[in-house]
């Protein structure tokens, strides 16, 4: 798809290839949580989720940083060619070193023979499709419906409330839609629109200077990963010691507090810096703070969803990703117009208020999550 986009003769065909690229890019964003569940023990999973989330979140920042340097010397088509080669390299690494992580103990059939054909059979799903008793597309869609959708529709007046009442499982809906969507909405808004803020006066940044500014959120992602690597283990071990070896998944959500404290502060700081034309370093500091919180909250929410429905990790990751991308890629349609109409200080201040209000969804799950897990049990897994 990337090669097709780089060779596209028109904007329409370019958009079509980019749309397909986004469709196929969803798979690695979702499957990571499932691989963590398959490979690692309970006490190891949050650390691995921390590394996985860090890699997913730092990618857009590093991509913008690298592209700015490449585009200073080459046109956009060769830039896409370099991206295609990176995709090819990653595919080669998966073929050489990757393996199927799912191990179904109910299956009597052995793994395929070693060698390139056996590995291709595993990695492409051919071996899994030949096995009996595996989930079908219909059963997976039904499980998604059970996890999310109510059997009846209540008439409401508001679109968000209507959507909320459709979903019967607040264990997934509240952290994913109520928190993750809002958290990613504003940061992707910054990622995609910051060139339009920094190119005009008083900043007059070049494309290379704008690219270098993406180092700031990359630093924030690194700090967030280091913090989460320590805090999540400390948080879980402390709860287990205090409760005689028992554990509640809702304890994971304490890791969100950093995100929902730093996030609004960062948005207010970012908006005021733009409104009062402060030094670009203030924007960089705000971006660092937001990304620290973003990584911390993403790891906590992902770990909670994995603890809540471990046998449906792919569905949980898919729902989180759906809300994340829904929020993230709709903001670009109104961010610039909003700032132009109301000013950066007001628009980013409202964003901060919305993010702070969304934190109520996390608190609600912490308070009533145990009751909801009993009331809304997950469907029985097929493998």
Image (tube, helix red, strand yellow):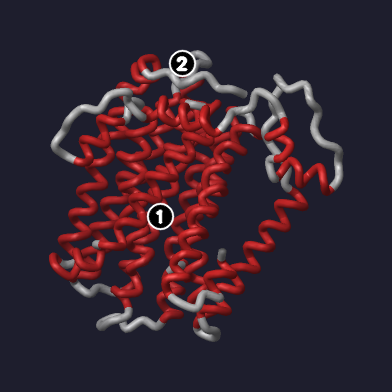
Q: Quadrant of the N terminus?
A: bottom right
Q: Nearer the viewer, residue 138 or 321?
A: 138
Q: Residue at x 69, y 34 (%)?
A: 128
Q: Nearer the viewer, residue 24 or 16?
A: 16
Q: Residue at x 32, y 25 (%)?
A: 150
- Characterize the local packing of mark 2: few (<14), some (14-19) or many (20 or more) Cα atoms within 10 angstroms: few
Q: Secondary structure at mark 2?
A: loop
- Give the image location of residue 27, x and y in percent: 55, 47
Q: Residue at x 40, y 43 (%)?
A: 297
- Give the image location of residue 379, x and y in percent: 48, 20
Which residue is tagged 1? 291
Q: Is residue 376 left or right of residue 113?
A: left
Q: Secondary structure at mark 1?
A: helix
- Residue 42 higher or lower than 350, as above or below: above
Residue 190 disc label: none
Residue 243 disc label: 2
Specify which label sits upstream in the sequence, 1 or 2.
2
Q: Quadrant of the C terminus?
A: top right
> Do the CB atoms of the residues marked 1 and 2 lie less than 8 Å apart?
no
- Characterize the local packing of mark 1: few (<14), some (14-19) or many (20 or more) Cα atoms within 10 angstroms: many
- Residue 207 higher or lower than 115, as above or below: below
On the image, which quarter does residue 278 sit in? bottom left
Q: Is residue 211 left or right of residue 367?
A: right
- Give the image location of residue 373, x and y in percent: 39, 19
Q: Residue at x 70, y 29 (%)?
A: 103
On the image, which quarter does residue 288 sit in? bottom left
């Amino acid at each position: 798809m990337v090669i097709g986009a780089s060779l596209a003769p028109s904007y329409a065909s370019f958009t079509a290839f980019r749309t397909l690229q986004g469709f196929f890019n969803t798979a690695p964003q979702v499957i990571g949580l499932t691989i963590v569940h398959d490979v690692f023990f309970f006490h190891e999973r949050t650390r691995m989720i921390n590394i996985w989330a860090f890699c997913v979140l730092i990618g857009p920042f590093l991509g913008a940083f690298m592209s700015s340097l490449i585009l200073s010397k080459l046109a956009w088509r060769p830039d896409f060619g370099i991206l295609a080669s990176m995709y090819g390299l990653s595919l080669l690494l998966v073929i050489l070193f990757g393996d199927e992580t799912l191990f179904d103990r109910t299956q009597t059939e052995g793994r395929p023979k070693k060698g390139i054909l056996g590995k291709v059979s595993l990695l492409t799903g051919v071996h899994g499709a030949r096995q009996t008793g595996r989930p079908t597309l219909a059963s997976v869609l039904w499980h998604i419906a059970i996890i999310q959708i109510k059997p009846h529709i209540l008439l409401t007046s508001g679109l968000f409330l209507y959507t909320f009442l459709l979903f019967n499982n607040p264990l997934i809906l509240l952290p994913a839609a109520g928190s993750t969507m809002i958290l990613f909405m504003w940061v992707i808004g910054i990622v995609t629109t910051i060139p339009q803020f920094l190119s005009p006066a008083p900043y007059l940044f070049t494309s290379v200077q704008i690219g270098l500014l993406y180092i700031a959120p990359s630093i924030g992602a690194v700090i967030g990963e280091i913090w989460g690597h320590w805090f999540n283990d400390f948080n879980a071990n402390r709860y287990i010691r205090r409760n005689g070896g028992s554990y509640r998944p809702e304890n994971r959500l304490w890791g969100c507090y950093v995100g929902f404290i730093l996030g609004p502060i960062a948005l207010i700081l970012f908006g005021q810096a733009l409104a009062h034309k402060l030094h670009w370093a203030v924007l960089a500091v705000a971006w660092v703070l937001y990304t620290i919180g973003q990584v911390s909250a993403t790891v906590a929410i992902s770990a909670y969803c994995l603890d809540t429905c471990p046998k449906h990790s792919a569905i949980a990751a898919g729902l989180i990703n759906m809300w994340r991308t829904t929020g993230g890629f709709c903001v670009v349609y109104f961010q610039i117009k909003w700032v132009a109409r109301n000013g950066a200080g007001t628009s980013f201040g409202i964003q901060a208020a919305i993010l702070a209000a969304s934190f109520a969804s996390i608190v609600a799950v912490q308070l009533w999550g145990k009751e909801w897990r009993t009331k809304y049990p997950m469907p029985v897994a097929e493998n």
